Image (cartoon, helix red, strand yellow):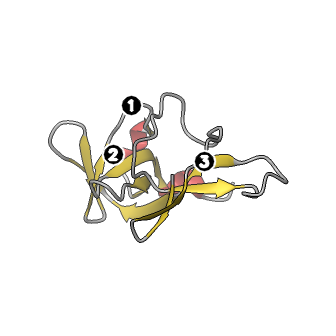
């Protein structure tokens, strides 16, 4: 379903791409629709991933806090072990229905350093 400001524009069916194994797309998850709606090229749905940087703090249950944000660790989330001991970057998908931030992955900043 494509919507702007809560108004439904159209409903589309398309394969998903770029999600971690085991990831389940939920109603309200922000995504990017690639391709052309007129059928000239195939449509694909990809996660609209945002990021936050900081130290990881354990929250209650399957929740992690990082950079003042509370992220839900859903099945399929990839958390590198060293991310809990050093400054890290968390990648997440925001949900417009319940305002949840679902963690896609958490990696230490050092993982992005040039060799």
Quadrant in the picture for the C terminus: bottom right
Residue farthest top in this picture: 22
Circle 3/circle 2 CB separation < 8 Å:
no
Look at the numbered disc 1 and give the secondary structure of its residue. loop
Q: Which residue is mark 3?
A: 12
Look at the numbered disc 2 and give the secondary structure of its residue. helix
* Residue displayed at 65% across by 38% down: 15
Q: Is residue 2 above or below residue 15?
A: below
Q: Position of residue 51 (x, y in %)?
A: 46, 61
Q: Tell me the crowding category of disc 2: few under 14, some 14 to 19, or many 20 or more residues within 10 angstroms, Cα based.
A: some
Looking at marks 1 and 3 on the same chain, the residue that comes earlier in the sequence is marked by: 3
Look at the numbered disc 3 and give the secondary structure of its residue. loop
Q: Which residue is mark 1?
A: 75
Q: Position of residue 53 (x, y in %)?
A: 40, 64
Looking at marks 3 and 2 on the same chain, the residue that comes earlier in the sequence is marked by: 3
Q: Position of residue 22 (x, y in %)?
A: 48, 28
Residue 60 lies in what quarter of the image? top left
Q: Position of residue 45 (x, y in %)?
A: 62, 47
Q: Is residue 29 above or below residue 8?
A: above
Q: Which residue is mark 2?
A: 84
Residue at mark 1 to residue at mark 2: CA–CA distance: 18 Å
Q: Using the image as rendered, state which of residue 54 and residue 85 is in the foreground.
A: 54
Residue 63 lies in what quarter of the image? top left
Q: Using the image as rendered, state which of residue 20 and residue 5 is in the foreground.
A: 5
Residue 33 lies in what quarter of the image? bottom right
Circle 1/circle 2 CB separation < 8 Å:
no
């Amino acid at each position: 379903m494509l919507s702007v400001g809560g108004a439904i524009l159209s409903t589309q069916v398309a394969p998903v791409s770029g999600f971690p194994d085991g990831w389940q797309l939920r109603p309200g998850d922000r995504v990017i629709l690639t391709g052309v709606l007129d059928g000239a090229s195939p449509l694909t749905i990809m996660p609209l991933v945002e990021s936050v940087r900081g130290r990881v703090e354990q929250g209650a249950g399957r929740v992690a806090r990082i950079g003042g944000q509370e992220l839900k660790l859903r099945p399929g989330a990839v958390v590198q072990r060293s991310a809990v001991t050093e400054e890290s970057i968390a990648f997440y998908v925001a949900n417009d229905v319940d305002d949840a931030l679902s963690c896609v992955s958490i990696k230490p900043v050092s993982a992005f350093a040039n060799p």
